[in-house]
Image: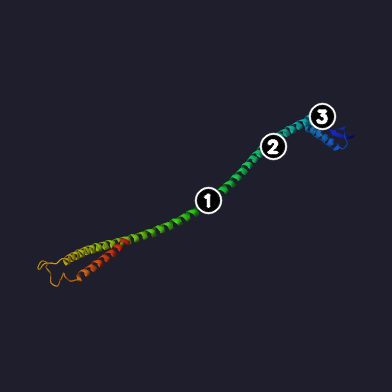
């Protein structure tokens, strides 16, 4: 043990303390002396009362310090609670941020997919437009060809009608020639009486070459008619 001499209110007191505690005990004694000096002329006549007053003053300061410390501790605890709540909210916000980040990434992927699909669709639309334009050109070409063919068909129809008319005329001529040949053959086969068959000038029904010539002429007319009919059928 060790001893420390304290001077309080002009009086000396010897106090025992543990080794190494001397400065701390001396500081406490000086604090008590300072509190008694604050009383000034209010000091009591008895030493014990003065010590009690100093102790009360120190106890009051200690109480106020404790109250302040409690208030500070409560404030710190409130701040800690607020910080914990803020930390929880921050964690929630971080979780929401992470979810939003994932959502944004997913939406970006979907957007990239939509852009790619749009590009493919645009390319397909361009291809379809090109094909449609080609189809239109082909349709226009086919229409022009159809009009040309229609004009050719109309021209061939006119030629056919002309040929048909010619064939009809040839048929009439052929029929007349055949009728005339038949009449001449019938006249040649008969033996006419004198004055019963009129003979025109320069014509003799007894000419042996007349009937074969007329038959050849009739054959020639039939050949021409057959050729005209074949040509009309082919058109």
Q: Which quadrant would the N terminus be assigned to in this image?
A: top right
Please provide percent x and percent y for residue 144: 36, 60
In primary-sequence order, the first of circles 2 and 3 is 3
Dot 2 corresponds to which residue?
A: 80
Dot 1 corresponds to which residue?
A: 117
Please provide percent x and percent y for residue 201: 13, 72
Please provide percent x and percent y for residue 114: 53, 49
Which of the 4 image quarters holds residue 68?
Answer: top right
In-image side of 210 versus 139 (left or right): left
Q: CA distance from mark 2 to mark 3?
A: 42 Å
Residue 51 numbered tag: 3
Q: Residues within 10 Å of mark 2 (few under 14, many from 20)?
A: some
- Disc 2 + disc 3, Cβ < 8 Å: no
- Relative vertical location of residue 232 with respect to residue 106 in this rendering, above or below: below
The residue lying toward the viewer, choosing from 157 and 141, is 157
In-image side of 212 versus 58 (left or right): left
Q: CA distance from mark 1 to mark 3?
A: 95 Å
**Which mark lies nearer to you, 2 or 1?**
1
Q: CA distance from mark 2 to mark 1?
A: 54 Å
- Disc 1 + disc 3, Cβ < 8 Å: no
The residue lying toward the viewer, choosing from 99 and 59, is 99
Residue appearing at x 32%, y 60% in the figure: 153
- Element type where label 2 sits in the image: helix
- Element type where label 1 sits in the image: helix
- Relative vertical location of residue 63 with respect to residue 191 in this rendering, above or below: above
In-image side of 103 versus 208 (left or right): right
Image label count: 3
In primary-sequence order, the first of circles 2 and 1 is 2
In-image side of 99 versus 51 (left or right): left
Residue appearing at x 43%, y 58% in the figure: 134
The residue lying toward the viewer, choosing from 197 and 167, is 197
């Amino acid at each position: 043990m060790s001893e420390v001499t304290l001077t309080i209110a002009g009086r000396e007191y010897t106090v025992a303390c543990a080794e190494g505690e001397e400065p701390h005990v001396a500081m406490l004694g000086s604090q008590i002396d300072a509190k008694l000096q604050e009383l000034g002329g209010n000091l009591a006549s008895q030493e014990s009362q003065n010590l009690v007053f100093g102790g009360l003053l120190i106890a009051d300061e200690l109480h106020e310090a404790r109250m302040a410390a409690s208030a500070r501790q409560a404030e710190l605890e409130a701040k800690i609670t607020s910080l914990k709540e803020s930390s929880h909210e921050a964690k929630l916000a971080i979780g929401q941020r992470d979810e939003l980040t994932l959502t944004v990434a997913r939406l970006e992927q979907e957007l990239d997919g939509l852009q790619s699909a749009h590009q493919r669709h645009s390319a397909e639309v361009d291809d379809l437009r090109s094909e449609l334009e080609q189809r239109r050109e082909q349709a226009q070409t086919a229409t022009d060809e159809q009009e040309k063919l229609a004009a050719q068909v109309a021209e061939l129809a006119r030629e056919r009608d002309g040929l048909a008319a010619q064939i009809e005329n040839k048929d009439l001529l052929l029929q007349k020639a055949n009728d005339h040949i038949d009449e001449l053959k019938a006249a040649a086969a008969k033996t006419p009486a004198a004055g019963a068959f009129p003979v025109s000038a320069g014509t003799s029904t007894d000419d042996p070459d007349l009937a074969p010539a007329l038959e050849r002429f009739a054959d020639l007319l039939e050949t021409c008619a057959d050729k005209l009919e074949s040509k009309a059928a082919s058109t």
